[in-house]
Image (spheres, rainbow, N blue to C red):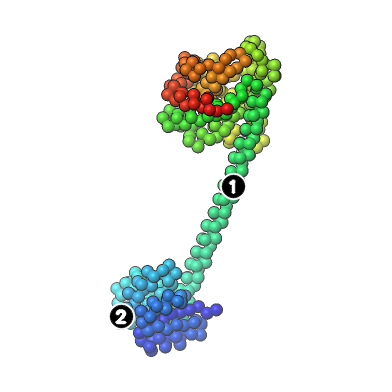
Amino acid sequence: MKKKIMIIDDNTTNLAVGKSALQDNYDVLTVNSGERGLNILGKIVPDLILLDVDMPGLDGYETIKLIKASNEETAQIPIIFLTARGDASSELDGLSLGAVDYIHKPFSPPLLQKRIELHLLVRDQKMRLAEQNLLLQDFNKNLQKMVDEKTEKIVRLQDIFVTTFSELVEFRDEATGGHIVRTQLYLKILAETMLERNIYPGSLERKDIKLLVQSSQLHDVGKINIPDSILNKRGRLTDEEFEIMKRHTTMGKEAIAKIVDKVEESEFLVHAQVMAYSHHERWDGGGYPLGLAGENIPIQGRLMAIADVYDALVSERPYKPAFEHDIAVGIIVQGKGTQFDPLLVELFEDISGEFQEISKKAV
C-alpha cells in the first residue's frame, strides 16, 4: 500500500510538478491553500506533508503551527517546507516551528524523492520504536504484576507457616492461651512508637516492623522440645526444671536456624531467630542463655522482653493469679535498668494504657 503525501501550495504549476514527480511511488493529494489542507486533515492523515511557505491567507508558518496544535496524530506528521526564499533566517524559522526539512524551489524531483524517502524512513523507525516502548511497558507491567503476585503468595505461605507452627507450640503450653496474639500486638505498638520517637535510631526501620511482628510468633518455639511435665507443671519449677525450661531459648534458635538453611526466602525468620534466644536476656547481664548486657542485647530481644513479661504478669499462670494492670506496670518499672532497657521502660510507661486495652480485647 502506497504512503500518502499531501502537497499544500497555492501555485497550480507547483502542485502539478510535485504530483508528477511523486505519483509513481506515493498516493499524492494536492491542496491549494492552508485552510483547505487543515480541513482535509480532519478526515485524512497523510504520512508526510510538503508545505509552501508563501501563500495568501494562511501562510506556511501559520499552517504548520495549526497542524502541530490540532491533535497528537497530526502533530507527528513530518512536514517539509517548499519555498523560493533563500535566506538562512527563513529556513531557521521553519525548522523552529517543527519542520523536518527545508527545500528550495525550483526543486530537483530526484532530490525531492530522496528527501521524502529519508524522512519517511525516520518516521517509520520512530513509530516502531514507540510501539516497542509500548510493548516494553506492557511487559514491565505484566512482569511487576507477576512479581507482586509471587511476593504476596510467599508472604501468605510464610504467615501460614509461622502461625501454624506457633499455634502448635501454644497448644502444648496449656498456660499461655492467647499469649502469642497479645505479644504480637504489644510488640507492634512498642516498636512503632520507638521509631516515631527516634529512640535507638538505625536499630530498626519502618519496613522491619511487619516482619518483626510476624516473626515474634516464634519467640517461644523452643518450648516444643520441653517435656510436658515441666511445660505444664502446676506450681513453681524446681531449680533443675528451670534449667531445662531455660533451654527453650537455644532450642528455638537452633530450630529456626535449621529452617533458614533449607529455604531460600528466609528473611522473615531473621527476627524470629534473634528473639527466640534473646528475649530472656537482662539489661544487667543476669539473663539467659548468653548473659548479654545493655545494648549488646539485640533490640528485638529488648522489645520482646517487655511485651512477654507484661503479658505473663496480667495473665493467669499455674503458679500465680493474673495481676492487675497497674501492678504489672509497677513491676516492669521496678526492673528499669536491671531487667529491662531503661529507655524502653520509659516508653512502655507512656503507652501502657494501650497495652491494657490490648490485654482486655485480645484473645
Crowding around mark 1 (Cα neighbors within 10 Å: few <14, some 14 to 19, many 20+) is: few
Residue 265 is situated, as x and y percent measured from the top left of the image, at 61, 39
Q: Residue at x 44, y 21 (%)?
A: 349
- Mark number, residue 171: none
Q: Quadrant of residue 226?
A: top right
- Mark number, residue 57: 2
Report the number of discs: 2
Q: Which residue is at the far top?
A: 238
SS assignment at label 1: helix
Per the model, the C-alpha gap separating discs 1 and 2 is: 61 Å
In this rendering, position of residue 177 left or right of residue 229: left
Quarter placement of the N terminus: bottom right
Residue 14 is situated, as x and y percent measured from the top left of the image, at 38, 86
- Mark number, residue 149: 1
Q: Quadrant of residue 272?
A: top right
Hey, what amino acid is under mark 2?
A: Gly
In this rendering, position of residue 89 left or right of residue 247: left
Q: Residue at x 60, y 17 (%)?
A: 317
Q: Is residue 179 above or below residue 161?
A: above
Residue 276 is situated, as x and y percent measured from the top left of the image, at 59, 25
**Residue 76 in sight in this render:** no
Q: Is residue 167 above or below residue 244?
A: below
Residue 270 is situated, as x and y percent measured from the top left of the image, at 58, 32
Hey, what amino acid is under mark 1?
A: Glu
Q: Residue at x 58, y 36 (%)?
A: 267
Quarter placement of the C terminus: top right
Q: Earlier in the sequence, mark 1 or mark 2?
A: 2
Q: Is residue 193 above or below residue 286?
A: below
**Residue 170 in sight in this render:** yes
SS assignment at label 2: loop
